[in-house]
Amino acid sequence: MATERTLSILKPDATRRNLTGKINAKFEEAGLRIVAQKRLHLSDAQAGAFYAVHKERPFYKDLVSFMTSGPVVVQVLEGENAVQRNRDIMGATNPANAAPGTIRKEFAESIEANSVHGSDSAENAATEIAFFFAGTEIVG
Ligand code: RTP
Ligand code: MG
């Protein structure tokens, strides 16, 4: 299996509750390496553009408003099969359906305030990483 990179976001519910270290520990314990990381407060325009794929979904407006409600931490995670591995550690979108031991099972507050974002394909990972990071900011 090839080494991959994926984009991760620690969402405002996670930064508000000071959970960034606990969540990062989950990534590192699972063999993912944090090769880039920065804390940002997303603007409406940034969050709207990042989630443009969901523009027609009923939850889009609420999602943009949630994602701009406080700081986020955007990260690049690197490792074997990183996209799927990160999705596995995150757990299901709705914490009520998330498996024991996953980040969302342990930390998420709701289907919206679910603590983390992770790219859902290698192709989207490349687009999402480029959205937030210059190549020189990623140090593998
Ligand atoms: P993400 O993109 O954040 O990694 O999460 P995901 O793939 O598991 O979920 P997705 O379907 O892509 O939805 C993106 C984010 O929108 C919020 N959401 N709210 N109120 C709702 O029914 C609802 N559904 C989704 C969540 O924050 C979800 O992670
Ligand atoms: Mg998604």
Image (cartoon, grey):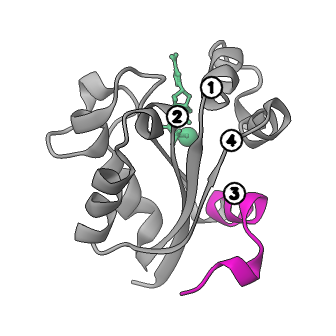
Figure check: 92 above or below 112? below
Check contact, mark 2 vs mark 1: CB within 8 A.
yes
Q: Position of residue 137 (x, y in %)?
A: 69, 78
Disc 2 residue type (three-letter): Pro
> CA separation, marks 2 and 1?
7 Å
Q: Which residue sits at x=81%, y=39%?
A: 49
Label 2 vs 4, first from the N-terminus: 2
Residue 38 appears in which quarter of the rendering? Answer: bottom right
Does the closest atom of ligand 1 sit within 8 Å of the Cβ of label 2? Answer: no
Q: Which residue is mark 2?
A: 12
CA distance separating discs 4 and 3: 17 Å
Q: Amino acid at mark 1?
A: Ser
Q: Report the Cα–Cα distance between label 2 and label 3.
A: 18 Å
Could you tell me which secondary element the residue under label 1 belongs to?
loop
- Residue 44 lies in quadrant: top right
Give the number of the disc on residue 41: 4
Question: Could you tell me which residue is drawn at 33 percent across and 52 percent down?
Answer: 23
Residue 88 visible in the current orientation: no
Pointer 3: what residue?
128
Q: Which residues are the magenta region?
A: 124-140
Q: Residue at x 38, y 20 (%)?
A: 110
Main SS, magenta region, reads helix
Between the residue at mark 2 and the residue at mark 4, the CA separation in whole angstroms equals 9 Å
Tell me where residue 140 appears, x and y as whole percent.
53, 87
